[in-house]
Amino acid sequence: MIIKKLSFDNFRNLEAGEIYPDSGINVIYGNNAQGKTNLLEALWLFTGGHSFRGNKDKELPRLIDGVNSLYCKLSADFYSFKREQNAEIIIKDGKKTCSLNGIGNKSAAYLVGKICAVIFSPEHLDLIKEGPSKRRAFIDAAICQIKPSYASILSKYNRVVTQRNALIKELFKNPYLSDTLDIWNERMASLGSDIINERLKYIEALKPYVKDIYSGMSSEKEKLDLDYICSFNTKNDGDIYTSFRKALDEAYKSDVNQGFSTVGPHRDDLALFIDNKSVRSFGSQGQQRSCVLSLKLSEAKMLEKSVGEAPIILLDDVMSELDNKRQDYLLNHLTDKQVFITCCSPETVNLLKKGKTFYMENGEVIKKDL
Ligand SMILES: Nc1ncnc2c1ncn2[C@@H]1O[C@H](COP(=O)(O)OP(=O)(O)O)[C@@H](O)[C@H]1O
Ligand SMILES: [Mg+2]
């Protein structure tokens, strides 16, 4: 998948302009608050999702003297699935619509699957720094992209957990209701084991990519490993369903005492180790960043394998805290796909061997020669 041309009109601080990206690496550099992330956000919107910044659509059109312009347009010419295509996004009166190859007035979701992208922004470091829910969300979102039916299993499971939790709270006061718990345990074990099996399958397939990319980033000096951590014992019994069903029965007392369901995929985690030490507890800033990058780039590999097209890679502000060798890896070794990297320092740009560079100042993009 290659973006050949991106035009923007009144998108955030980008007034009106266009860029013709390289089919490989594109570096967008400039001082803070000039519009570099805005440009990546514009590209990301073509994936059909919401802004990765969590903003509302009506905040996207350019503010002029503090007032939102009424109209904002993005257009992308891209090559994908062996043909030249065009997509447009228009935000008018706070409402976002899109069109694909001239067929217009669709909701943004119409673009899902037409342009695929993987984004890394500094907030994604939460994936390492924060608790297990961020890591579960990463795995779940990645699986949903390649298997949309997984989303419905997840939402059914979450509903069952909510209902079981309500019953658990009730049981504290009325233990005679415990017979009804069996039905919820059964549903939870059935849906929950499907979730765990999908996650295990995904992690197993992801693992070789993550290890390989991390090894490349660290010039083969460090070894990254990852493991899915189940919240219950899976060693003794046959399959996940049987172990989970048993674990739910065994957790009865602690569930009632704590007032919620203490075991299940909603409590699982993904553990990451560099040279056998937990990245979360012991990793340096640069190692944690490299680790998240390896996960994201591997997610892109998985997407490519499933869709048959390499997604575009958007790397926002990744370079700080990475040494020259790691920067060199990102700039010069991701050659088989289209990458957009933003950074502040012109020195970083000098490391680029092949690709295009764009200088961003006050919402204006200026192409610079290498
Ligand atoms: N709707 C908008 N209209 C005009 N300017 C905006 C809008 N949204 C954000 N901005 C401006 O864009 C700038 C931030 O751009 P950003 O892409 O985050 O910068 P950076 O180059 O540091 O990545 C800020 O100055 C912000 O005020
Ligand atoms: Mg930025």
Image (cartoon, grey):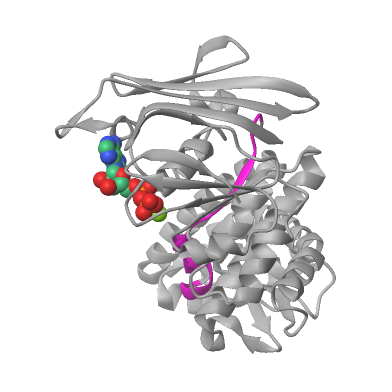
The range drawn in magenta is 114-131
Q: Is residue 14 above or below residue 268?
A: above
Quarter assignment of residue 110: top right
Image quarter (top left, top right, bottom left or bottom right) of the N terminus: top right
Residue 90 in percent (x, y) is at 42, 20
Q: Is residue 122 above or below residue 217?
A: above
Q: Quadrant of ligand 1?
A: top left
Residue 36 in percent (x, y) is at 43, 48
Quarter assignment of residue 201: bottom right
Residue shown at the point (30%, 24%) measured from the top left:
94
Residue 47 in percent (x, y) is at 57, 35
For this orientation, the residue located farthest to the right is 238
Number of numbered discs overlaid on the protein picture: 0
Does residue 248 appear to the left or right of 316 in the view shown?
Answer: right
Q: Is 351 in front, or is 155?
A: 351
Residue shown at the point (61%, 41%) measured from the top left:
152
Residue 346 seen from this side? yes
For this orientation, the residue located farthest to the front is 369
Q: Is 178 in front, or is 313?
A: 313
Residue shown at the point (56%, 65%) measured from the top left:
135
Q: Is residue 100 magenta?
A: no
Q: Is 184 in front, or is 269?
A: 269
Q: Is residue 116 magenta?
A: yes
For this orientation, the residue located farthest to the left is 65
